[in-house]
Image (cartoon, grey):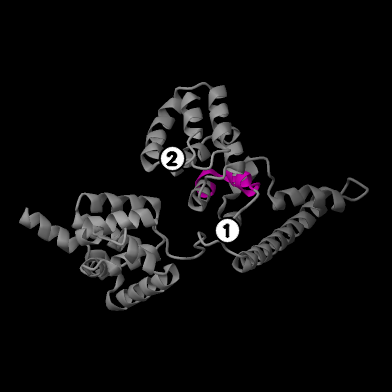
């Protein structure tokens, strides 16, 4: 609790402080009592700058612990919410549904879960399947006043009624899903919401930063091609632009954080660290690029790459430079 309290007091924690808290939280959490865990989660549920690794860890705990955090935490990103809803089951998804503000992207993901959630999970959590729930009702309605011919007519009447109810239920769910999708598409989206757009993951961003800092160009190109789902040739072609303009366009287009983009540009292209009017050349370059124009340009490059290379060629392309590096070593 002392660790959580001291972290809460930080108004704008640095990247190092966030990383240190993420490393400390898990072992402290496992070593704490049940009541202390609840208090820590309740406190972090009101904190606005919880690291996403910690948010994912808390959200993946049993629902008795995770519910307050999933319902009210302002620090959970959409990607984290969607991952928790898809991997932890119906109880966690229902806790997410109770959040006050859900982005269209999260709404769309939650709606899609209705068709992918196993029926056994629904019935196992105390939610009877509509088909089985309809059978007792149909039996009671079709039960005659006398009991001599009760068994055969009831069974015959129940099965078609249950099948009809199941068909109607699925049709209603599909109609509701389409309505929610239309609402999600027409809702005003914040600038940070990249509904349906190509977006870099936290893991990919972390790897690109690491490989750029260590000057590991080969690994950087492999990760960049994975981010773009393109051939390695495209990633290397982007990196060959020594002005840094194409790489900056790519990273902005996939929604990478600007601080990380500046770090990568100055690491791979040292001349961009030069100062001009109180700003580095990397700052000026990033400031001149429009996110939506950058996204359109990246999509154009990727479409051209798909026309040039088949799926098999894109899968093989990243491996060829690696073999050359091994022979050189």
Disc 1 + disc 2, Cβ < 8 Å: no
16 vs 162: above or below: above
Sequence-first disc among 1 and 2: 2
Residue 229 visible in the shown view: no
Magenta highlight range: 85-99
**Label 1 packing within 10 angstroms: few (<14), some (14-19), many (20+):** some
Q: Is 22 left, or right, of 217 in this rendering?
A: right
The main secondary structure of the magenta stretch is: helix
| Location of mark 1 (residue) | 112
Q: Is 125 left, or right, of 326 in this rendering?
A: right
**Label 2 packing within 10 angstroms: few (<14), some (14-19), many (20+):** some
For the residue pair 91 and 150, the one nearer the viewer reads as 91
Helix, strand or loop for disc 2? loop
Q: Is 209 left, or right, of 181 in this rendering?
A: left
Residue occupying image coordinates x 60% and y 67%: 185
**Mark 1 or mark 2, which is nearer to you?**
2
Q: Residue 64's spot in the image, x, y percent?
A: 60, 33
Q: Residue 285's spot in the image, x, y percent?
A: 32, 66
Residue 148 visible in the shown view: yes
Helix, strand or loop for disc 1? helix
Q: Is 65 left, or right, of 316 in this rendering?
A: right
Residue occupying image coordinates x 57% and y 63%: 189
Q: Residue 113's spot in the image, x, y percent?
A: 57, 54
Residue occupying image coordinates x 51% and y 28%: 5
Q: Residue 228's spot in the image, x, y percent?
A: 34, 65
4 vs 183: above or below: above
Q: Which mark is residue 13?
A: 2
- State the CA–CA distance, disc 1 to disc 2: 36 Å
For the residue pair 163 and 1, the one nearer the viewer reads as 1
């Amino acid at each position: 609790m002392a660790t959580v309290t001291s972290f809460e007091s930080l108004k704008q924690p640095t990247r190092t402080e966030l990383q240190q808290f993420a490393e400390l939280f898990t072992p402290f959490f496992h070593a704490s009592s049940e009541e202390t865990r609840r208090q820590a989660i309740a406190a972090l549920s009101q904190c606005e700058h919880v690291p996403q690794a910690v948010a994912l860890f808390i959200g993946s705990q049993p629902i008795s612990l995770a519910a307050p955090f999933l319902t009210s935490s302002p620090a959970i990103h959409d990607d984290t919410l969607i991952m928790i809803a898809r991997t932890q089951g119906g109880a966690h998804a229902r806790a997410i549904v109770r959040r006050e503000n859900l982005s269209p992207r999260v709404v769309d993901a939650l709606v899609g879960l209705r068709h992918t959630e196993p029926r056994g999970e629904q019935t196992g959590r105390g939610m009877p399947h509509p088909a089985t729930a309809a059978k007792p009702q149909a039996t009671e309605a079709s039960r005659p006043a006398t009991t001599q011919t009760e068994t055969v007519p009831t069974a015959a009447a129940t099965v078609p009624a249950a099948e009809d109810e199941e068909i109607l239920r699925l049709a209603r769910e599909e109609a509701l899903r389409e309505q929610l999708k239309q609402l999600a598409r027409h809702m005003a989206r914040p600038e940070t919401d990249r509904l349906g757009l190509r977006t870099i993951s936290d893991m990919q961003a972390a790897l690109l930063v690491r490989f750029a800092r260590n000057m590991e160009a080969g690994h950087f190109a492999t990760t960049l091609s994975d981010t773009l789902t393109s051939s390695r040739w495209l990633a290397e072609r982007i990196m060959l632009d020594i002005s840094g303009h194409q790489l900056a366009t790519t990273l902005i287009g996939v929604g990478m954080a600007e601080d990380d983009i500046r770090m990568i540009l100055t690491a791979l292209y040292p001349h961009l660290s030069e100062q001009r009017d109180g700003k580095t050349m990397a700052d000026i370059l990033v400031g001149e690029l429009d996110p939506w124009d950058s996204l359109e340009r990246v999509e154009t490059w990727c479409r051209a790459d798909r026309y040039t290379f088949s799926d098999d060629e894109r899968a093989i392309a990243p491996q060829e430079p690696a073999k050359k590096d091994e022979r050189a070593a």
